[in-house]
Amino acid sequence: MVTIEAQDTNFKAYMPSDLSECDARQYIEMCKLIFKMQTEQISYDELKTHAVYKLLNMVPSNKESIDDENKFGNVYRLSEKIETFFDIVGDDQKVIKQNYIHNPIPMFRPTWQTLYGPTDQFMNVKFGEYRDALRLFYEFNTTGDINTLYDIVAILYRPKKYFHAIQKRLPNYDGDIRQSYNSNHVAKRAEVMRYAPIGFVYGVYLLFASFQKFIVTAQIPWGDKMLDLSILFQNDGDRSNEDALPDAGMDSVMFMMAESGTFGTLKELDNTNIWMIWVRMYEIRRKDLEQQKQLENAERNPS
C-alpha cells in the first residue's frame, strides 16, 4: 500500500500496490483497465494514468488552472507507482501480479438480485462447478471469446439459498450461502451477467486465474502434515515441467473417483467440496509415487 500525502492541504490517501490490496470498487476499476489494455483499447501508459484517478476515487477536472502543470506532474509521478501491479517478463512484457486467493468481490448485484461468489480460498466451491469453470477458463485462454467469461461468472456467482437462515441451523449445513450449482441454469444467468460491468466479469476471471496459479504449487496444512499439492499437476519424474500445468485432468478425476465410489455417485461427487477431492487425489498420487520409487529401487538393486 502506498501512502499519498499533501502537507499543505492535509490530504492523505492510500493507493494499492497490486490487485491483492484493492477493495471491491478498486478491484473492479483496475480489472476494467487491465481488460481494456489487454484488448488494445488503451495503452499501458494510459492505464497507469487512469488507474491513479480510479484507485484514489478522483475525477479529472475540466477547468483550467495555473496549477495544472504541477497537478499533471503529480499524476505522472503517481502513475509510475502503478507499475507495481505488474511483473516484467521477457522482452518488456507486462504480466499482472496474481498473488491473492481471497475474493475481493464476495457479492455483486448486476441487476435486481444479489449474487454470491466463492469465499476466500474457494472454500465453498464444489467439484462440479469448479470442473465446469475450469474447462471454460482454458477455453477463454485459447479463444479469447468473452462469452465464456459470462459463463464462468454465472457458474461461480449464484443467488442465496432459499430458507438459508433455517438451513444454517441444520447439522448438515455445508457453509455455502449460494444456491446449489445446477449447470442447466448457467445460460440464463450468463445473460444477466451481460448487464454487469466488464471490470467485475474480468475480475472474476482473474480471481480464478490467481487461484489456479496458487493451487498448482500449494502446500496446505492438513492435520499435523503439510500436503504438497504440486504433485497432482506435474509429470512423473519432472516436477518442473510446466507443460503438465494447463490440463488438470478434472474430467478424468471425476470418472476415476466415481469408479472408486469414494464420494458416491457422479452427482454426489460433483457436490463434494474441491478441497476434499484434492486431499483424496493427493493420497492416491502419493501412494503411486511411492510405488514407482520402490519399483525403481528394485530395478537398481535386484536381489
Image: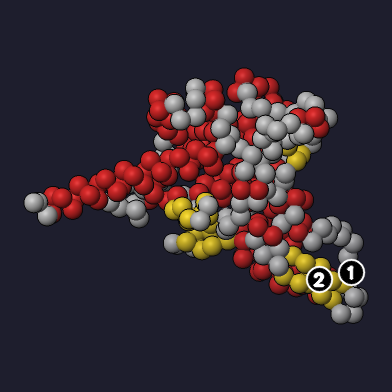
For the residue pair 295 and 1, the one nearer the viewer reads as 295
Q: SS class of the residue under badge 2?
A: helix
Q: Which residue is at a point 81% across and 68% down the rendered structure image?
A: 13
Q: What residue would you read off at disc 2? A: 71
Q: Is residue 19 above or below residue 257?
A: below
Q: Which residue is at a point 77% across and 51% down the rendered structure image?
A: 25
Q: Is residue 59 shown left or right of residue 201?
A: right
For the residue pair 261 and 20, the one nearer the viewer reads as 261
Q: Position of residue 215 (x, y in %)?
A: 50, 49
Q: Is residue 129 shown left or right of residue 241?
A: right
Q: Callout 2: 10 Å neighbours few (<14), some, many (20+)?
A: few
Q: Is residue 251 shown left or right of residue 68?
A: left
What is the three-letter code of the residue carrying label 1? Ser
Q: Position of residue 197 (x, y in %)?
A: 73, 40
Q: What residue would you read off at disc 1? A: 65
Q: Position of residue 289 (x, y in %)?
A: 31, 47
Q: Is residue 76 shown left or right of residue 63?
A: left
Q: Which quadrant of the view contains residue 259?
A: top left
Do callouts 1 and 2 mark residues in contact (Cβ within 8 Å)?
A: yes
